[in-house]
Amino acid sequence: MIKFFRKIRYNLMEQNKTGKYFKYAIGEIVLVVIGILIALQINNWNEGRKLEKSKSQLMLALKSELVKNKKELDNYSLEIHESNSRFNKVLLYSVGDYTIPNDSLKFYLSEMIYGRTLSLLSSVQEEAINSGKFEMLSDSLKQNLSVLKDYTNSRKVISDRSTAMLNVDIDNRIVNLMARLNMLPVIPDEFLSHPLIPTHPDFLLSNMELSSLVKNPDTYLTLNKIYLMYAADEVWVKYGLVRLTDKTIALIDKELNTND
């Protein structure tokens, strides 16, 4: 093709057709420029497709991580709600506004403490932030993910402070009370590697002694302190983390459908 154009230019020069030669040369330059522009456009289109593909893959990975977190949050929210319901009944019993049979009271006391730690995934988002891929996302999605991350971190800080405050028990007063009320968490059977340790004889109470201890004002204050901590966490998770996670998943679905 290049030889063909050269031959045309050569023939025009040989025939002293200078005007036609310059017109042809200009036309050839225009064609070259158009070719370059087309090539750039195709390259930009290919780069755009690669970027959209990477963006979609990132959003799918983020959604997968959030869906797993949503399942964890739902399970945690349900179980801590059940724990708080038992706490609530025991506290009502403590102030004399609720009647509980002895067997039920013992069961509620043994199941009130929720020892499970909420563990949420964040590796996909952290990797996206560290690698710079996070900037590919839309402003609205970045904002939702950032708010969710900040909310998760804030909840953990508050939860850790509450737990630390509860664990400041220099004279073992709280642990002593929990042992006498049979509130100490029990290791699930599937995680047992050693025989269960029985309750110390000094902590075994009769039904009357147990009832009296639960209704003691100091016991009420300690149980209420733990209950308020758990109740606040239930609200934080149910109306904060779950709501924000649902909202972010819905936004990802919307943007993925828009890109299809």
Image (cartoon, helix red, strand yellow):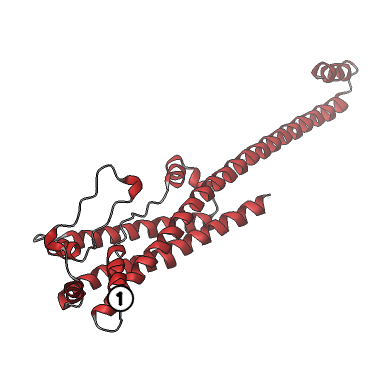
Residue lying at 52% horizontally and 60% vertically, measured from the top left: 246
Of residues 58 and 110, the one nearer the viewer is 110
Residue 213 located left or right of residue 56: left
Residue 98 in the image: above or below residue 182: below
**Along the line of sight, the residue nearer the viewer: 19 or 105:** 105
The answer to which of 130 and 75 lies nearer the viewer is 75
Quarter of the figure with residue 99: bottom left
Q: Nearer the viewer, residue 39 or 231?
A: 231
Crowding around mark 1 (Cα neighbors within 10 Å: few <14, some 14 to 19, many 20+) is few
In the depicted structure, whether residue 121 falls above or below residue 215 = above
| Residue 34 percent location from the top left of the image | 76, 35
Tell me the kind of residue under disc 1: Pro
Q: Quadrant of residue 232?
A: bottom left
Image position, residue 189 (x, y; %): 33, 49
Total marks shown come to 1
Q: Which residue is mark 1?
A: 101
Up the image or down, 230 lies above or below 1; here it is: below
Left or right: 151 as drawn, with respect to 41: left
Please identify the residue farthest to the bottom as the structure is shown.
97
Residue placed furthest toward the left: 171
In the image, what residue occupies the spot 32% across and 45% down? Answer: 191
Whether residue 41 sits left or right of residue 101 in the image: it is right
Rendered location of residue 65, percent (x, y):
49, 48
Q: Dot 1 lies on which element?
A: loop
Question: Seen in the image, is 102 located left or right of residue 2?
Answer: left
- Residue 136 coordinates in the image, percent (x, y): 54, 46
In the rendered image, the quadrant that contains the N terminus is top right
